[in-house]
Image: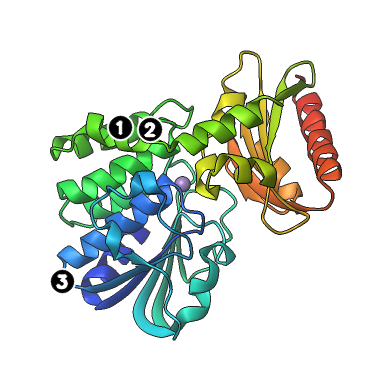
Amino acid sequence: MTDLCHEIADIMRREQSFLILTHYRPDGDAIGSQLALTLALRDLGKTVEAWNDDEVPAKFKFLPGVNLITKPPVTPKAFDVVISIDSSTWQRVGTSADKIASKKYFINIDHHVSNEKFAQLNWIVTESPASGQIAFDLIKRGGFKLTSDIAQCLFAAISTDTGSFMFGNTTATCLRAAAELVETGINVGELSRHVYESYPYARLRILQMALADLKLTDHKHTAYFWVTKDMFATSGAKREDTEGLIDFARSIEGVVVALLFEEMEEDGKFRVSFRSKNSKVDVNSIARHFGGGGHREAAGARLTGLPQDVETRVLAAVTTALQTAGI
Ligand SMILES: [Mn+2]
């Protein structure tokens, strides 16, 4: 693929202290990839830290080594190597960025097309469905040991970013990687129960409220719904619980674009998630128009303004994209 893989593997062998970062509001790929690298480095006898501003979502707390992820410290620390994985921008690692006193090497590993190549060494594989698959490649080709602990983390990463091997980004390479991970002895059924069947009841409650107002537009090619601050308060759902809710809008027959509008805690701020079921509609470019980004088929953006205005602006951009695509 690229010899950046070997260059990074050499640095991992040669240097001693490491910091592994990923994006805030971490998803399965973020946590799984971050933990896999952290565990691989620990197995090499290295000093390694892993930070995140946000808590690990409850459903990923079963992953091996999850307690190694801490909040960034108050006082900045020095590292030989800082690796960011699955974060498309340096800003998305959150406050960790301000807690690094110094670093010799700065490495960025990611699969987002929107990656800003902010480090010294940028290993961006946009064909990879998950950062976990790039981490898998690094571990395999770098000559590191693929333990079943690491395999569990990588399987969780790849499984979640491919919608359990269901989305169009699921390639033969990805399934081969998954097969190798399973060969280490991991229990796929048990892992999937943690990841997909251990949701708090509050998540279903907020889903119930949100779906009550689901709307279709653009000749039923666009489905969208809202989660509001009121819904969070009434249901008791946490912010992390909205992950994956958009798939319910996406699952409707004939829907091409699914949107989830989420009202943030701060007044006038909104997070919009975008999904596309048609390769002709690139939601990454729609999200970029609003200062966000992601992948062609899954992206996000943060907008400010009045809720009605935010909704109108986003829907207008989606209508244009559908028309341009001839849908
Ligand atoms: Mn990812």
Q: Nearer the viewer, residue 279 or 69?
A: 69
The numbered mark, 3 or 2, whose residue comes first in the sequence reads 3
On screen, residue 34 versus residue 308, left or right, reads: left
Q: Position of residue 93 (x, y in %)?
A: 51, 65
- Who's the residue at 40% across and 55% down the image? 56
Helix, strand or loop at disc 1?
helix
On screen, residue 245 versus residue 33, left or right, reads: right
> What mark, if any, has residue 45 been given in the picture?
3
Helix, strand or loop at disc 2?
helix
Which mark lies nearer to you, 1 or 3?
1
Residue pointed to by mark 2? 196
Decide: few, some or many residues near mark 1? Use Cα within 10 Å; few <14, some 14-19, many ≥20. few
Q: Position of residue 21 (x, y in %)?
A: 42, 65
Residue type, numbered disc 2: Tyr
From mark 2 to mark 1, how far is it between C-alphas?
Answer: 5 Å
Decide: few, some or many residues near mark 2? Use Cα within 10 Å; few <14, some 14-19, many ≥20. few
On screen, residue 317 versus residue 87, left or right, reads: right
Q: Position of residue 256 (x, y in %)?
A: 66, 23
Query: Quarter-wise, where is residue 69 in the image?
Result: bottom left
